[in-house]
Amino acid sequence: MKEDVQAYWNQWENIVKNEVVAWRNYHLYWLKQAQDRNIPIYFFRYEDMLGSTFFIMKELFAFILEMKRVEGTFIGHLIDENIARGKEVGALQEPKID
């Protein structure tokens, strides 16, 4: 088994390096496009969406709708309602960590 790993180590290392560079260049390209065109970007992590769905959804919709807050609005009400409904039926699940 150790020999198998050694035999492919350099190949694997090159693949990983190439993919990291490709990923970096892809994201830098789109960030530059947004910056050059003065397009606002909202960043969030998938983990935050799972752990703080309520907060992230309200923040995201406020960003999209160019509002400071969505609390007290129709969209805020829909977010509240759907988050609550998701919890009732178990739609919102904890991430699986193995």
Image (cartoon, helix red, strand yellow):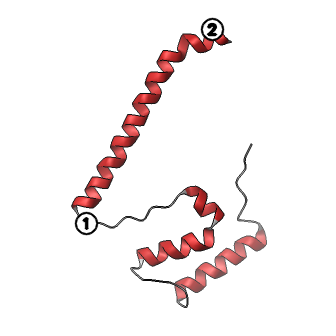
CA separation in Å, label 2 and label 1: 52 Å
Identify residue for label 1.
38
**Quarter of the C terminus within the rendering:** top right
* Residue 62 in picture, x, y percent from top left: 46, 78
Above or below, 15 relative to 59: above
Task: Please rate how many residues cluster around mark 2, counting C-alpha atoms within 10 Å: few if below 14, some from 14 to 19, many from 20.
Answer: few
> Could you tell whether 35 is left or right of 3 in the image?
left
* Residue 17 in picture, x, y percent from top left: 42, 29
**Quarter of the N terminus within the rendering:** top right
Residue 77 is tagged as: none
Q: Looking at the image, which is closer to me, 85 or 48?
A: 48
Give amino acid for label 2: Glu
Q: Earlier in the sequence, mark 2 or mark 1?
A: 2
Q: Find residue 79 and report its image quarter.
A: bottom right
Task: Please rate how many residues cluster around mark 1, counting C-alpha atoms within 10 Å: few if below 14, some from 14 to 19, many from 20.
Answer: few
Residue 3 is tagged as: 2
> Could you tell whether 24 is left or right of 57 in the image?
left
> Could you tell whether 17 is left or right of 80 in the image?
left
* Residue 29 in picture, x, y percent from top left: 29, 48
Residue displayed at 65% across by 63% down: 51
**Total marks in image:** 2
